[in-house]
Image (tube, helix red, strand yellow):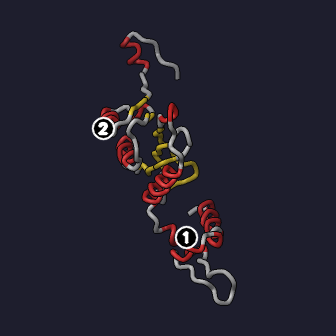
Amino acid sequence: MTPVSWRSVIEQSKEVPGLPAHVLDQVGARPDLILPGRALPAETTVRRLLAHIDGDVLDRVVGRWLADRHPKPTGTAALRGLAVDGNSLRGAAKAEGWKIHLLAVLERTTGLVLAQLDVGEKTNEITCFQPLLDTVAGLVGAVVTSDAMHTQRECVDYLLGRGAHYMQSSRVSATAARRSGGARPPP
């Protein structure tokens, strides 16, 4: 672990005293009979708890929770826009030295990241496209945008099967543009 993750766990453990009483009851924080308040878990306990949480499951639960709490648009603003894109995290790496690369779906009007998946070392974004969007409810009528990597028949068929619309950019190489008699597209 890096000092950045240590600092975040320490910061997270400092938030425990501010949790509502019913949440503290659910995680087993018992009232302290000598000191006022409750016997709260130590930073190491919070660290062990977080180490056992499946990040993908937590991400799906939080994404759905956020989406449920956001008011649904009505009228002419009812068109839902979603963007799918992947990025490598700066300054983060797995134990084997591989960079962490995530594929995420973002709701364009709110900026909420509804879901994200870790793209494994032995795969790519294309194979994660469908599993990522499987975790997003309500694709019917949504417009899903993605970059040229997802301009694949499987991706388009999947979106149409879920009742979504799509907008995807495509890249034309200089060679292909010359063969077709067209000009090279701007970078």
Question: Residue 36: x percent and y percent?
Answer: 69, 83
Q: Secondary structure at mark 1?
A: helix
Q: Say if residue 148 shows up in the picture.
A: yes
| Residue positioned 55% across, 73% down in the render | 22
Q: Secondary structure at mark 2?
A: helix
Tell me where residue 171 sits by quadrant.
top left
Q: Amino acid at mark 2?
A: Gly
Question: Residue 35: x percent and y percent?
Answer: 69, 86
Q: Residue furthest top?
A: 181
The relative height of residue 79 versus residue 29 in the rendered view (above or below) is above
| Residue positioned 43% across, 18% down in the render | 174
* Residue that badge 2 annotates: 161
Which one is in front, 142 or 118? Answer: 142
Q: Amino acid at mark 1?
A: Arg
Tell me where residue 42 sits by quadrant.
bottom right
| Residue positioned 55% across, 71% down in the render | 23
Gap in angstroms between the C-alphas marked 1 and 2? 42 Å
